[in-house]
Image (cartoon, helix red, strand yellow):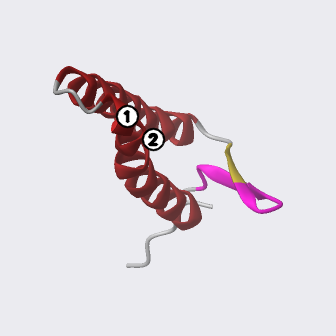
Amino acid sequence: MILKHEIWFEKVGLSYIPCHWKGFAVMGAVILPTLCATFVGQWALDRFGYGSVDWLAFPIFFIPALVSLLGIAKRHS
């Protein structure tokens, strides 16, 4: 039995654009927790007195989210 891949994203240039409701859902499921984790991480660093490195939470959470979202988009394009 051969399974066909569902097309959730369309490749445009060097990027992927969602073209199905599941593509939008995946983006929301990755972006929303990433933003929440980034804001909480920045808040926690500021509360612990490390306000000068509050930028550190952004790459820690953003890079893995970006890599996973690009992998999902490539798989479903």
Q: Secondary structure at mark 1?
A: helix
Whether residue 8 is in magenta: the answer is yes
Q: Residues within 10 Å of mark 1 (few under 14, many from 20)?
A: few
Q: Residue furthest right?
A: 13
Q: Are marks 1 and 2 in contact (CB under 8 Å)?
A: no
Q: Element under label 2?
A: helix
Instruction: Determine if the magenta segment contains residue 23.
Output: no
Expressed as whole percent of the image width and height from the top left, the position of residue 51 reads: 33, 28
The amino acid type, in three-letter code, at marker 2 is Val
Residue ID at (21%, 27%): 49
Please tell me the numbered disc located at residue 67. Answer: none
Q: Is residue 21 left or right of residue 2?
A: right
**Image height of 47 relative to 13, above or below:** above
Residue under numbered circle 2: 26
On the image, the x and y values in percent for residue 52 come to 37, 34
Position of the N terminus, as image quadrant, is: bottom left
> Which residue is at the front of the view, 19 or 17?
17
Placement of the C terminus among the 4 image quadrants: bottom right
The answer to which of marks 1 and 2 sits earlier in the sequence is: 2
Q: Which residues are magenta?
A: 7-15
Q: Residue at x 20, y 20 (%)?
A: 47
Residue 52's label in the rendered image is 1
Q: Look at 37% across and 44% down and name the residue there.
A: 56
Q: Residues within 10 Å of mark 2 (few under 14, many from 20)?
A: some
Give x and y (percent) for residue 2. Answer: 43, 78
The amino acid at mark 1 is Ser
Q: How far separated are the C-alphas under marks 1 and 2?
A: 33 Å
Camera-side residue of 34 and 1: 34
